[in-house]
Amino acid sequence: MSGFAVRGWCPDAWRPMAAGDGLLVRVKPVLGRLTQAQVRGLSAAALAHGNGWIDCTSRANLQLRGVAEATWPALLEQLVALGLVDPDPAREARRTLLVAPDWRAGDDSHRIATDLLAQLGALPALPSKMGFVIDAGSAPVLADAPGDFRVERAADGGLLLRAAGRQRGVVVAPGQAAEALVRIAHWFVESGGSAAGRMARHAAPLPGWAAGDAMPAAGGPRLAPGRHALGRVLGLPFGQVHAALLSDKAAIRVTPWRLLLTEGVDGTLPGLIDDPADPLLRADACAGAPACPQASIATRDLARQLAPHVVGRLHVSGCAKGCARADSADVVVTGRDGLLDLAFHARPGAQPAHAGLNPAGLRALFGID
């Protein structure tokens, strides 16, 4: 029997999730963007009703941490007033949309995403972990981002609709992409997909209209810390930032890579990453103890110590659940009953190469005094 609980749903603002440091309240900015007024409002709300820490998720959402149950209703009211949460809980639950963060007003990604948002009421009720991806720039950048149905640039320059688990997709006309997403979502439910929970686990063959041989275009480079045509990209250590750092900042865009794109400015922020070679960009660590009741170790200070000494990807996990990273990593440290298991090229909970280490013993293996 496992020593941790697996959540079968994702939190949102209307349905927060309990953590060791209070409630997690998830905010899904429209098109992944917050205006300057929304940045200020969100920061003030996080400081007033939470512990001030904000997580950036792999779906380009934000999570406010440390929210008390007693103040959650007031927080929710503020988030709705800011336009960051839909006043209708059912519409908010359907708003699981990831958009390529470098979209420009009027381009294909912006237009398709806006069209889909206008049709939220036409979507069926889907499992909470499902999501849509709009990646219609000249070269896809979200190929590794989580999503069940995506519209992306095709190799021939057109647009294609592709379901998770399929390498190829079907060509769609530019003005019909959002309708195609709604249509395939209905097919998913009607064909029994809700029992599988995700498209990649759904065994039913695609309907004829959605099965095609179009290949997506070759992927483009992800954003990286430094200057950008829209402003400046800054990295968040372990995907977290304190609200006080954002309280007077310009509009920002959230990415699925633990990066923020600040619009129209070229300055840095203390504590954030401006160097694309910073080893913390290669380190994943969950909240750890005591913020998470399932974690048996503190994670992030340990990850900071190890990251400069690790070649490749580092993952420090408070338990075998591995929330911070779904894929394997080159070096994995897993907390177990307050001690540390070390594995290589694995996921948390894998058979360790070194088991039951204390922090000093682990550091010694990496030549750290």
Image: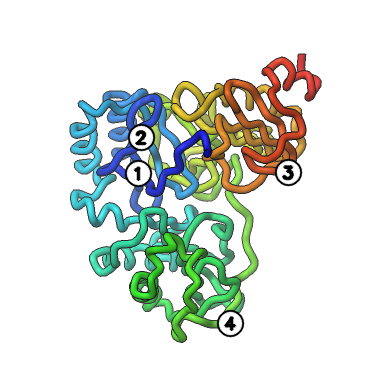
Choose top left, top right, bottom left or bottom right for residue 112: bottom left
SS at mark 3?
A: strand
Q: How many marks?
A: 4
Disc 4 marks which residue? 213
Residue at the spot 61% in from the left edge and 70% down from the top edge: 217
Q: Would you say 347 lies left or right of 38 here? A: right
Q: Mark 2 vs mark 3: give the one in front.
A: 3
In primary-sequence order, the first of circles 1 and 2 is 1
Quote the CA–CA distance across marks 1 and 3: 30 Å
Q: Quadrant of the C terminus?
A: top right
* Residue sticking out furthest to the front: 1
Q: Give the image quarter of residue 329.
A: top right
Tell me if 105 is positioned left or right of 201 in this view.
left
Q: Position of residue 51 (x, y in %)?
A: 36, 23
- State how far apart marks 3 and 4 are (Cα): 34 Å
Q: Earlier in the sequence, mark 2 or mark 3?
A: 2
Q: Which residue is mark 1?
A: 11
What residue would you read off at disc 2? 24
**Residue at numbered disc 3:** 345
Give the Cα separation between the discs numbered 2 and 4: 41 Å
Q: Tag 3: Cα neighbours inside 10 Å, few (<14), some, or many (≥20)?
A: some
Which amino acid type corresponds to the residue marked 1 in the rendered image?
Pro
**Horizontal placement of 48 versus 301: left or right?**
left
Residue 187's place in the image compared with 324, above or below, is: below
The amino acid sitting under disc 2 is: Leu
